[in-house]
Amino acid sequence: MHKTKLPLTTWFWAMYLVAHDKRGKSALSLSQILNLNYRTAFRLMRKIREAMRARDDQYLLSGIVEMDDAYFGAPRKGKDGRGTTKEKAVIALSKDHKNRPAFLKVKVIEKVSIDEIHRVAKACVKPGSKIVTDGLNTYKRLAEYGYLHESKDYYKEDKNTFLKTLHNIIGNIKAFIQGTYHGLSSVYLQSYFEEFCFRFNRRGNPNEIFDHLLHACVLADPYPVP
C-alpha cells in the first residue's frame, strides 16, 4: 500500500474478497465488484499475492513431508507425461502428528530434475525432516542433502492411500486455476500458487483469514508493479 492512490477501504475490500472466496478472485471480477480499471485491479492483486508469498516464505515444512511433481496448463506440442511441455511444479505437504495436512508449499520448476528438486527442498523443507515420495530417480538423492527420505513405487502401492491427500490437493489446485483463471499466463503461475497455499494454510480458522491477510500486507515490503 506504499504511496497508494486507492482509498484504504478499496484495499480492505479487495483483501476481504480474496480471503473469503476459496475459488479465488480474478482481477476482472475484482474490477467489476469494486468499480476499478482492470489494470488497477490486476496490480492490486499482484501486490496482495506478493504479500502472501512473503508471509508464507517465513515458514519451513518440517516433520513428515509428502512431495510430488505435477503439470499445469495445456501442452504446447501435444506431449504428455514427464516429457510434457506443460508448466511443472513441485508440491510439498507437511503432516501433523495425526497424519493430517498441516502446511502446503507449491513451487514452479523448470524441469523435473535432481537439481530442481533439491532447490525446492532446500527452500521449503527444514533439514532433518522426513520426505516421502514416489520412486522417481530425481527424488532419490534427497538423503544426500540432509533429509530422511522414504520412497515407494507408486504402481506397487495402494493408490487409494499412498500420497492420497497430496494428490487430492493437486487436483484442487488444478480446479482452482482452471475454474477461476481461464487462460492463465505461465509468467504469473507462481503467484497463483501462493494465493492457493496462503488460503489453504489458514483453512482451520476461515473467519480469521482476512485478519491474517491484512497483517501480511501491512508487514510486506513495498512491491513495485509496472
Image (spheres, rainbow, N blue to C red):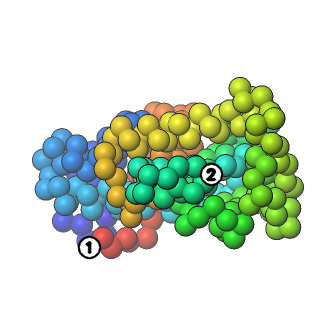
Q: Give the residue type at disc 1.
A: Pro
Q: How many marks?
A: 2
Quarter of the image for residue 47 reads: bottom left
- Residue 225, percent from left and from top: 30, 70
What is the number of the mark on residue 72?
none
What is the number of the mark on residue 226?
1
Location of the N terminus by quadrant is: bottom left
Would you call the spot at circle 1 few (<14 residues within 10 Å), some (14-19), or many (20 or more)? few
Quarter of the image for residue 3 reads: bottom left
Q: Residue at the spot x=53%, y=37% of the render?
A: 171
- Residue 146, percent from left and from top: 85, 65
Q: Residue at the spot x=19%, y=60% of the render?
A: 39
Q: On screen, 152 above or below 143?
A: above
Q: On screen, 75 above or below 172?
A: below
Cα separation between marks 1 and 2 = 32 Å
User: Is residue 16 in view from this perspective?
Assistant: no
Q: Secondary structure at mark 2?
A: strand
Q: On screen, 223 above or below 34?
A: below
- Residue 204, percent from left and from top: 57, 33
Q: Secondary structure at mark 1?
A: loop
Q: Residue at the spot x=41%, y=49% of the render?
A: 74
User: Is residue 13 in view from this perspective?
Assistant: yes
Q: Which residue is mark 2?
A: 69
Would you call the spot at circle 2 few (<14 residues within 10 Å), some (14-19), or many (20 or more)? many
Q: Give the residue type at disc 2.
A: Asp
Q: Earlier in the sequence, mark 1 or mark 2?
A: 2
- Residue 51, percent from left and from top: 44, 60
Left or right, 180 with respect to 57, comes to left
